[in-house]
Image (tube, rainbow, N blue to C red):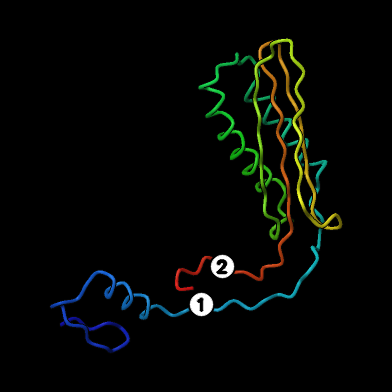
Amino acid sequence: VSTQSTGKCYSDTGSSIASLRRAAAMAKPRVEYENSYRTCPDVVFPGARASKIIQRVLDSRLAGMKYDHEVCRTMCNQLSDLIKDEIRREVKEIPRYKLICCVTIGQVSGQDVRVVSRCLWNADQDRCGSASFQTSHLWAVGTVFAVYYDGCFNHHNPDQ
């Protein structure tokens, strides 16, 4: 017999992993978050500043690179994560914005390409930033959408 911090006893015989997890979840204090009722941001996301950050990341990471579809596939994911990290690091006043980053890389082969995005959002609060990069071998477009959220959601609480 093992005693939990709640003072309840649980028998080791016949207990399953699920029941042990339930017991552990019951022993943890449940954290309740109050709604802030803030429906608009204190500071609007700086889209122009984000565009400069995107441009700097694309220029530094893609300079001198030649197009290879396998390398570019993983590079898109890495650049997307790096752009979001750089924006979060440099722009401190955006704690209530969700960042969605899209990076597209293609080969320069004499064709015309347009990268277009659509999004349903609140034009008063939500913003985006975009930048492009091109060499004689490849082109890239990076876009960040900053969507404001008011915090009325589950704060990653596993019990809910």
Q: In the rendered view, would you say 44 is above or below 13?
A: above
Q: Secondary structure at mark 2?
A: loop
Examine the image and state in which quarter residue 60 appears: top right
Identity of the amino acid at label 1? Val
Left or right position of 56 against 81: right
Mark 1 — residue? 31
Residue 113: x %, y % from top left: 75, 22
Identity of the amino acid at label 2? His
Q: CA distance from mark 2 to mark 1?
A: 9 Å
Left or right position of 102 against 20: right
Q: Secondary structure at mark 1?
A: loop
Circle 2 residues within 10 Å: few <14, some 14–19, many ≥20: few
Residue 65: x %, y % from top left: 61, 16
- Looking at this view, name the residue that lies furthest to the bottom: 7
Mark 2 — residue? 155
Callout 2 touching callout 1 (CB < 8 Å): yes
Q: In the rendered view, would you say 48 is above or below 149?
A: above
- Looking at this view, name the residue that lies furthest to the right: 124
Q: In the rendered view, would you say 35 is above or below 120?
A: below
Along the line of sight, the residue nearer the viewer: 45 or 108: 108
Q: Identify the residue shown where x is 69% and y is 59%.
A: 95
